[in-house]
Image: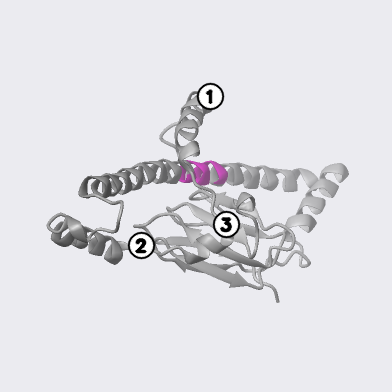
Amino acid sequence: MSNYITPAGTFTPAVKTTVTPIVTSAQAIIGPLTTPLSPEQEAKMSSVGIVRSAEITAIYERIIEVHPELLPEGWTVAKFGAMMQEGTDIVATQEMFLGLAANCGGIAKIVENNLLYICNGTMDRAKISAKTSKPMDLIVKGISTDFHGKTNVKKVATEFSIAPAGIVTITGVETGKMFTNHGFTILSILVANGLISETIISNPGSGFYIPSKWTKIAVTNVSATIDGKFSLFMQG
């Protein structure tokens, strides 16, 4: 049985009401800057992790700033430097949101744990009541059969790790089952040959049910600096 965890505070409806317009405002600012990509464009994009990022900085400092004439046509040191700053700023902003998402995920886990703790205690009392109450006995047996019966054997999810800015293609996914983001990064999930508009975004600590026919999917780690972790159910 789980243990009750005393939370530092309560995520009240008032907190959600306060936070929602802030998130909406951020989405209104960042949303228009998002460029829709086709699956082909996604597949051809380079993954820029820690090593490649360091290489970009080295080329900028050792060649571009010293020999700007070697830049491709139409580019200047100032223009490239501005893009470097853009990259730094967007990654910093992403990390802020990832931190908040991780906090929300931690709060949700404690709330869910405490809900289960209370429900387990309630069931213990219900089982005692069921000894002298036929209606309660039927309720208890019904719940026990639904969630703890031999026919309700849980299939174990397969866990995956994904490198910063990495893409993992998975074949043989069982649809209708839960995809869970266990890490601290935002993950982008798309069915093979799907439209970019069908992309599902999974925040840290969140999950969703794999849609029908999504037996082959591509999972992208949005973070360029942090490893991602997730689990899903495989066929067979």
Q: Position of residue 132 (x, y in %)?
A: 82, 44
Q: Residue at x 46, y 67 (%)?
A: 161
**111 magenta-colored:** yes
Quadrant housing residue 233: bottom right
Q: Which tag is nearer the camera, tag 2 or tag 1?
A: 2
- Relative to the observer, which residue lies in front, 164 or 57? 57
Q: Earlier in the sequence, mark 2 or mark 3?
A: 3
Q: Residue at x 70, y 77 (%)?
A: 236
Mark 2 crowdedness (10 Å alpha carbons): few <14, some 14-19, many ≥20: some
Q: Main secondary structure of the magenta part?
A: helix
Q: Which tag is nearer the camera, tag 3 or tag 1?
A: 3
Secondary structure category for the residue under label 2: loop
Q: Is residue 202 visible?
A: yes
Give the residue pinned by disc 2.
Answer: 48
Pick out the residue farthest to the bottom: 236
- Region in magenta: 105-112
Q: Earlier in the sequence, mark 2 or mark 1?
A: 1
Give the residue pinned by disc 3.
Answer: 38
Give the residue pinned by disc 1.
Answer: 17
The amino acid marked with disc number 1 is Thr
Q: Residue at x 65, y 71 (%)?
A: 234
Secondary structure category for the residue under label 1: helix
